[in-house]
């Protein structure tokens, strides 16, 4: 079979590969602590599940409008207007099966061979992968530890050329948990307006924030008409398997996204969308409790990693990841990740899964219980100290 050349440029999301290796190790009877996947370890709240069941019983099992059900687009517009602090028209909202299609459609709509896309390094690997797939040139903007893993806006300015079509940033940030400041947003906005560049603002973790309030770049003067706001339901309401994302778009992109949706996925499942209406409009107690639990886990894992000789760990301001520097142990991130899984049964990701800046780092998800985080810290300390890790057999799955 002769494959098209463009498929050679499609990367992958290493977290799924790491999870597969960890599950294979578990299948041999080893006990593995999972700190690799970016997925809340909480159940979808009961009121949301109940809304989906009602929708199924009421017959919401057929095709819906390509851009999303009016009820959900309305609910997103009301919620986004309040939380993101700019006026959102329901007609500017597009609902998709997961948030990744927003990235893909944005790149298909705006970038082509000869164009450049600036994206964060480290950053979500799909940014670079999909940029290459559409034939454009990915241009990494380094997020350095000494700058708390935030963009250096002067360096960003130096990377912009006449070929730059899109600037992508993510706040709160995966994999580091950093948050873009208001002054950073203002500088990015000034540059985007000055050079007539569209911005993709990935705000999927905007509700998982530990200090201050979320600020959207689209709320700044002149930015709503040049910003694609990406958000969704996976992280905030523990709905990863539901595959529900959305975008708030400039008007010029709406017909393009509509055609891309029709040509790819047709629409998003109707009963899931009605569950999402309940997520936005129903009680938020479960979300608040989840964020508070993540806050406690953050303290536990940051202090625990900092206490291990050779490891230093910045405290994240959002999301549910830490990005510790392990260079003081004499190992790189990939070496450490391999040893932790094979010797200690701790599954995490090498920082290089998110770009070359992460060579000396790990990404560790604290979307696991405090008990398991404590056990993982003990095992990490043993590996760093060169000791033998005793791993009990895994509990058989029922």
Image (spheres, rainbow, N blue to C red):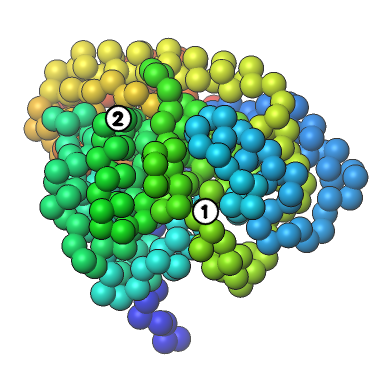
x then y, percent, for residue 210:
41, 19
Residue at point 27%, 24% (across, down): 380
Q: Secondary structure at mark 1?
A: loop
Q: Residue furthest right?
A: 58
Q: Is residue 328 left or right of residue 325?
A: left
Q: Quadrant of residue 257?
A: bottom right
x then y, percent, for residue 60:
84, 50
Q: Quadrant of the C terminus?
A: top right
x then y, percent, for residue 111:
36, 68
Residue at point 76%, 58% (across, down): 64
Return the residue at label 2: 181
Against 92, residue 207 (above or below) is above
Return the disc, 2 or 1, that comes first in the chain's sequence.
2
Relative depth, front residue between 175 and 369: 175
Residue at point 35%, 13% (across, down): 299
Relative depth, front residue between 41 and 231: 231
Return the residue at label 1: 249
Residue at point 45%, 67% (across, down): 109
Are discs 2 and 1 less than 8 Å apart at CB?
no
Q: Quadrant of the N terminus?
A: bottom left
x then y, percent, for residue 234:
56, 39
**Is there any visible trace of residue 241 in the rendered image?**
no
């Amino acid at each position: 079979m002769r494959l098209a050349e463009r498929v050679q440029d499609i990367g992958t999301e290493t977290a799924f590969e790491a999870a597969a290796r960890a599950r294979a190790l578990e299948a041999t009877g080893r006990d593995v602590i999972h700190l690799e996947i970016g997925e809340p370890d909480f159940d979808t709240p009961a009121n949301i599940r109940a809304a989906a069941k009602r929708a199924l019983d009421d017959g919401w099992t057929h095709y819906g409008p390509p851009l999303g059900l009016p009820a959900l687009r309305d609910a997103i517009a009301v919620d986004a207007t309040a939380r993101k602090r700019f006026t959102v028209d329901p007609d500017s909202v597009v609902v998709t099966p997961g948030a990744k299609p927003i990235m893909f459609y944005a790149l298909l709509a705006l970038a082509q061979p000869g164009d450049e896309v600036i994206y964060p390094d480290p950053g979500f690997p799909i940014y670079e992968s999909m940029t290459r797939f559409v034939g454009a040139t990915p241009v990494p903007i380094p997020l350095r530890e000494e700058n708390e893993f935030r963009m250096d806006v002067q360096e960003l300015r130096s990377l912009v050329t006449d070929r730059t079509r899109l600037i992508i940033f993510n706040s709160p940030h995966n994999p580091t948990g950093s948050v873009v400041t208001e002054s950073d947003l203002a500088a990015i906005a000034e540059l985007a307006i000055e050079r007539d560049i569209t911005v993709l603002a990935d705000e999927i973790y905007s509700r998982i924030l530990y200090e201050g309030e979320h600020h959207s770049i689209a709320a700044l003067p002149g930015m709503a008409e040049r910003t694609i706001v990406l958000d969704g339901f996976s992280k905030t309401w523990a709905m990863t398997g539901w595959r529900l994302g959305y975008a708030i778009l400039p008007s010029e992109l709406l017909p393009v996204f509509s055609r891309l949706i029709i040509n790819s996925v047709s629409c998003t499942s109707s009963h899931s969308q009605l569950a999402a209406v309940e997520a936005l409009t129903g009680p938020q107690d479960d979300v608040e409790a989840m964020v508070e639990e993540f806050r406690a886990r953050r303290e536990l894992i940051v202090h625990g990693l900092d206490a291990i000789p050779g490891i230093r760990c910045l405290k994240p301001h959002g999301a549910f990841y830490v990005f510790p520097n392990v260079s003081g142990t004499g190992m790189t991130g990939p070496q450490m990740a391999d040893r932790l899984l094979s010797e200690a049964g701790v599954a995490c990701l090498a920082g290089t899964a998110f770009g070359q800046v992460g060579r000396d780092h790990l990404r560790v998800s604290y979307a696991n219980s405090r008990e398991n985080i404590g056990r993982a810290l003990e095992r990490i300390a043993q590996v760093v100290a060169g000791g033998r890790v005793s791993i009990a057999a895994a509990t058989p799955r029922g």
